Structure formats: C-alpha cells, structure tokens
Amino acid sequence: MARLLHNLLLLTVGLTLKIRVMGYWSLVYGYCALCTGVALLKLGWNIILRPSTTFQWTVRETPPACLNDTSLGTHCYVRIKESGLRFHYVAAGERGKPLMLFLHGFPEFWFSWRHQLREFKSEFRVVAVDMRGYGESDLPSSTESYRLDYLVTDIKDIVEYLDYALHHPSQLLKSSYYFFFQLPYFPELMLSINDFKALKSLFTSRSTGISCKGRWLTTEDLEAYLHALSQPGALTGALSYFRNVFSVLPLSQSEVKSPVLLLWGERDAFLEQDMAEACRLYIRNHFRLNIISGASHWLQQDQPDIVNTLIWTFIKEGEGRKNYRNL
C-alpha cells in the first residue's frame, strides 16, 4: 500500500511538472502567434499605403563622421580566448586608471555611450563595447551562440584582457516584442521595411523615443545607428539575444554582492518601474535606485547630464564607504 501511494505521488508530481512546462510554452508560442498576427496586419497596411517603398531599404556603406569623432576615444579590437570572437570597442582615458565598462542593449551599439565616454575619461579608463553580433564585433551565425552564459563569458574575458583584475502582467504587454522576435526572418523584415522606419521610430517617436527635446538624435546620430544595423546579418545578430531568452528561464536567483546603482527612466516604454524595485531582492550590498523624471528607455542619451552626475555621486560615495571601513 505504501509503495502504491509512493508511486501515485511521483506520478502526480511528474504530471504537474509536465503541465506547468506545457503551460509555459503554450503562453510563449500563443503570445508569439498574437504578435505575429498584429505584425502581419501592419505589414499589409504598409503595402497598401506605400506599395513602391515598403520593401526598399539601404545598406549604409559609409559611416557618418560622428563615428570617427576622436573626442570619444580610440577604436580598438580584441580577440578573446574563450570564444575566439573578435570584439570592437572604443576606449578613452589613461591606461592604468580604474576601468569603467559600458555595455549597450538593443538596438544600440558603442555609440550609445558617447556622452559618458567624454564625461568619465578624466578619471577612468572608459571602454564602450560592441556586444557580439553588433557593430564591428564578430557576428556568429548560430542563434545558440547568443546564450546568456556565453554573453557573461564574453564580458569576463574582455575585462581580463583589459588587464583589470514574469509576475507583472503590464510588463508582459510591454515585453511583447520578446515574443515576436522568436520568429525567424520575419522580425528582420518588419524592422527593415520603409528603409528601417521601425528602428528610426524606436528613438524618435513620442511613445518610445528620447524625451528631452534638447537631446533628440540628430540626422547624423540616427544615421550612425542605421549604419551599424543595416549591415548584412546585423539585425539577426541583435535579435538572437532575444531568441535565447525563453530557453534559460526561469533564471537561478543568484545574489549580487557588489554595490549597485540602478538608473531607470520614468517614461520607459519597455520596462515597468516595479521591475526596478524588485531588483532590491537580489542585491546583498549597497543598492541605490534612481528614477529619472521624464527620461525614456534611452536615458543615458536622453538625460546624460543627470545620469553622469548620479554616477559620479555613487562613485564618490563608494570611495567614502571604503575610507570609513579602513579607519
């Protein structure tokens, strides 16, 4: 009798786990299908309105002058040991000073950190990296090459080379692009039509673009992004980050033991403020969260003066804490 109960318990637990897994992937693929339907409607509407230009886009072969601005730093390359990939980065400030490493998100590249490269090079060795699949860094063709553990290893190896030792429904809606990006080829098409109109809109529209009027991207700034993302295979590399997200969920809840400054745009169109507050649970050191009033998702470009000031303050406070402990 005891053995029968034991077997029934194991069967029940196993069945429950399978149902949860099936429910999880049903949600992923169901939402993906919904987003695809919406995208198809948008594509059809574009074809009706602009039949001659919808499928026209230009690969920018010549980089705009702002990408060669020497005040931002020196363009460098490194082939790291673990993956063998070559990475491009822009570095400024004296060698031997403390490293300040800048890592961009989608659909950006090293240029997103131009305001910070100029600001912090006086006291730091500042380095803005093109992540794998972006800009002038190597572009692995396999989607598997963009798994989270590979990305973490990239950063570890780059730092060593530089010689320095889903609980919110509203967030689910804001993250709908994650599901749409799971599709092969079609997201690349939708981001490219009408000469990359969707990419331009991310930075310039009222709902998702840079909020501060004085910081709107210039035509040259925008061309810098389009130069990077219009290259053959560039969009696929960028989207491959998203195509690996669901395979690693749920993430193990590791604790962060370093001091953390988290800056968040009040008008972020893609991330809920509740997600910022939830980060406190995983920090086992000094943690500061600053919600920047009026700032968009692109806050380091939107409000660079405020962002730079907050970073300086956090660094100086950290130095003060170290000195206090040493007394």
Image (tube, grey):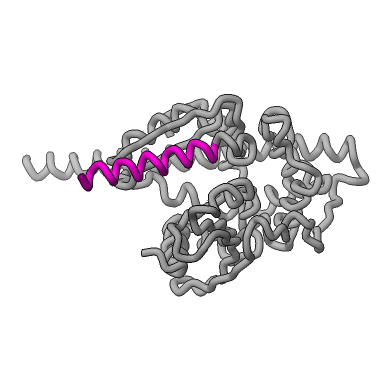
Q: Is 151 on the left-hand or right-hand side of 239?
A: left
In this view of the protein, can residue 214 be seen by the observer?
yes
Please tell me which residue lies in front, 186 or 263.
Answer: 263
In this view of the protein, can residue 254 be seen by the observer?
no
Q: Is residue 173 above or below residue 74?
A: above
Picture coordinates of residue 267 (x, y %)? Answer: 59, 27
Q: In which quarter of the image is residue 235?
A: bottom right
Picture coordinates of residue 25 (x, y %)? Answer: 47, 42
Question: Can residue 311 be found in the magenta stretch?
Answer: yes
Span of residues in magenta? 307-327
The N terminus lies in which quarter of the figure? top left
**Residue occupying the point 56% across, 25% down:** 293
**Residue at the left extreme of this rendering:** 2
Please tell me which residue lies in front, 277 or 33.
Answer: 277
**Residue occupying the point 91% across, 42% down:** 51
Q: In this view, does 96 lie above or below 183?
A: below
Q: Is the magenta stretch mostly helix, strand or loop?
A: helix
Q: Quadrant of residue 87?
A: bottom right
The C terminus lies in which quarter of the figure? top left
**Residue at the front extreme of this rendering:** 327
Q: In this view, does 268 lie above or below 92?
A: above
Picture coordinates of residue 73 (x, y %)? Answer: 62, 60
Please tell me which residue lies in front, 325 or 37.
Answer: 325
Picture coordinates of residue 210 (x, y %)? Answer: 67, 34
